[in-house]
Image (cartoon, rainbow, N blue to C red):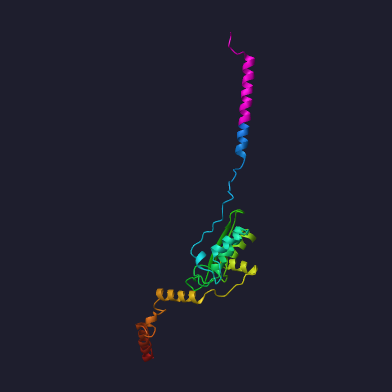
């Protein structure tokens, strides 16, 4: 029996093979075009991470920043809203010297604060730097994110933006604690003008030199 294939059968078989392969390629292409599905188990719980200020300070209340943020998230608040509300607790605590009201001043004794935030779902971000007179810079940073097309406002521009939104601008954010720490720092870096507490009752030698110089000038005149 002749097992050779004739021209007609060959073309028919080839056409069927090409058609089948095209169908498979189209199916594969369609499956690759679909966006990946994110698997989110129902047992996943929110996780709030903070440095020591997030759990050490309560500003006289019952909750710290981590507790407030976590309760807000599981209670249905927007994640960023809950986090900002949590951050406001240590920001307003005068015992916290790292952020907000009570934050340590710069070399000139002026409290300048920085804050930034990001909203992952919305892909938004906003921040402020070197802002003065605002106890809760995190709220201003959130307003920059939500109300402007900027990512960062700084200095007097950030303060003026906050003023326009109705934020209270204070002349001085120093607390008794932050001012005392600043004065002690100034004394250590500039001992000729800020005297050691142990020597304040005894004029330094430089004072005696000035007295002697003044006496010589008077004698010449």
The location of residue 98, given as percent across then percent down, is 49, 68
Q: Quadrant of residue 85?
A: bottom right
Q: Residue at x 58, y 61 (%)?
A: 71
Quarter of the picture containing the C terminus is bottom left
Q: Residue 220, can we see it?
A: yes
Residue lying furthest front = 43
The location of residue 205, given as percent across then percent down, is 34, 83
The location of residue 201, given as percent across then percent down, is 38, 85
Looking at the rendering, the stretch of residues picked out in magenta corresponds to 1-24
- How many discs mark residues in the rendered view? 0
Q: Is residue 16 rendered magenta in the image?
A: yes
Q: Residue 153, can we see it?
A: no
Residue 190 lies, with reference to residue 210, above or below; the image says: above
- Comparing 18 with 54, the one in front is 54
- Comparing 119 with 68, the one in front is 68
Quarter of the picture containing the N terminus is top right
- Comparing 142 with 154, the one in front is 142
């Amino acid at each position: 029996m002749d097992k050779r294939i004739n021209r007609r059968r060959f073309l028919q078989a080839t056409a069927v093979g090409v058609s089948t392969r095209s169908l498979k390629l189209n199916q594969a292409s369609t499956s690759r075009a679909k966006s990946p599905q994110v698997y989110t188990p129902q047992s996943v719980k929110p996780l709030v991470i903070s440095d020591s200020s997030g759990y050490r300070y309560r500003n006289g209340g019952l909750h710290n920043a981590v507790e407030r943020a976590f309760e807000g998230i599981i209670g249905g608040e927007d994640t960023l809203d809950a986090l900002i509300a949590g951050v406001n607790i240590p920001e307003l605590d005068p015992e916290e010297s790292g952020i907000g009201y009570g934050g340590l001043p710069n070399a000139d004794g002026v409290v300048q604060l920085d804050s930034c935030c990001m909203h992952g779902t919305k892909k938004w971000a906003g921040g402020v730097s070197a802002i003065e007179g605002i106890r809760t810079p995190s709220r201003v940073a959130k307003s920059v994110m939500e109300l402007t097309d900027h990512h960062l406002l700084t200095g007097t521009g950030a303060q003026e933006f906050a003023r326009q939104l109705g934020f209270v601008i204070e002349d001085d954010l120093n607390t008794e604690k932050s001012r005392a720490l600043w004065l002690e720092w100034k004394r250590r870096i500039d001992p000729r003008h800020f005297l050691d507490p142990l020597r304040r009752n005894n004029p330094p030698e430089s004072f005696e030199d000035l007295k002697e110089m003044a006496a010589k000038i008077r004698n010449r005149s």
